[in-house]
Image (spheres, grey):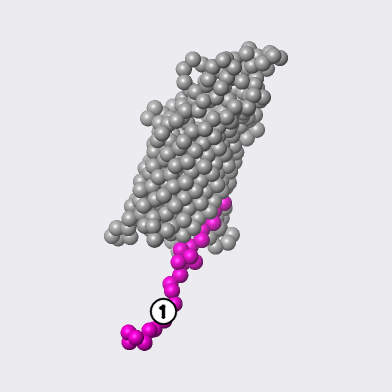
Amino acid sequence: MTFGLKNALLLLMLCVGFIPVMAQIQPISSHYMYNPQVVNPAFYGSHEGIRFGANYRHQWAKLEGQPKTIHIFSDAYLPQAHGAVGLQISNDMLGAYTNTSINVGYTFIQPIKDKIKIAIGLNTGFTTSKLDGTKLVTPEGDNTGLNDDYLSGQIQRSFRPNLNIGFSIQHKNVEAGIAYSNVIQAKDKIEGVNNTLKTIYGGTFQIYASGKVIVGKGISIKPSMVINTDFKEIQTDFSFLVGYKEYVGVGLNVRGYNKRAFESLSPIISVGPIKNICIIYSYDVNLNQLSIVNKGTHEITLTYILPRNKIYKNPTIINNPRFL
């Protein structure tokens, strides 16, 4: 019986067997330097206004069952609350498996001398998982079913809580942060024919840093890096962008370079056609063996920032003759 690439991707992820499954729930992004708050809640309110954004990542195009991630996010600076709040909604699809998450969070922001701010943030929420058994095909299956005690031919759902924490330090042209995602590490429980498939989602620790250097009139360079690890494997991204004011930026992201592998190169371009609006596009060129069976990865992000001075305007001063 034919075992399609979609089903191969799914079963590789689930690793169906006699022990609990280990998985990661944090999809990567080539636009991490534009939206660090997506992973680290300590960056909520970093623009001191209200920020809205949406991101779509279509990974390994033309590969059957390829991952697709949609992310919608917003955060607002609240000086009265000494910090900021944020909201994130995401939908991550891989073959017959889908994760949908909703998280809300708060960040405490403390300014210190020389225009430096430190922040501590957390967000919490839930994830619902869906495994569509009608899309599964197993090597031992036949016209009567999947013939697997851990899988069902029906649609199965699971629910688990989320908790993410982060710390950041920010200056006018430098920002850095650390974050730990999925602190609770709750399990998915998907009912099979005779047994329950228990997927354990491990935590991810992230280190992020980015800077901005003005090199000419309106021209700047922005080096960035991010390291993600589950304390077993390490994923690295290094980026270098050149921009002119807020109008346009171009650069390159290098992912997964080490002695054993070189995962991808990602050209990036950003444009600001209207003030406070930014559109970012990147294309990941695979440099590993996956390049044989896919056509690269497309990613696009749209963000809008409503500045603080448009929200918190200085009140009109009215002289009171009682205190002249």
Residue drawn 45% across the image and 37% down it: 162
Q: Position of residue 300 (x, y in %)?
A: 58, 46
Residue 305 among those drawn in magenta: yes
Q: Residue furthest front?
A: 322
Query: In the shown orientation, is residue 297 left or right of residue 26?
Result: right
Q: Does residue 28 show up?
A: no
Towards the viewer: 209 or 193: 193
Q: Nearer the viewer, residue 76 or 125?
A: 125
Up/down of 153 relative to 89, above or below: above
The front one of 48 and 324 is 324
Residue 89 location (% of width, % of height): 54, 44
Q: Is residue 295 left or right of residue 21?
A: right
Q: Is residue 187 visible?
A: yes
- Looking at the rendering, in which quadrant would you find the N terminus? top right
> What span is colored magenta in the figure?
302-324
Q: Is residue 184 magenta?
A: no
Q: Is residue 270 above or below residue 310?
A: above
Q: Which residue: 62% across, 13% down?
A: 147
Left-right relation of 266 to 147: left
Name the residue beneath numbered marker 1: 317
Residue at screen point 49% across, 48% down: 87
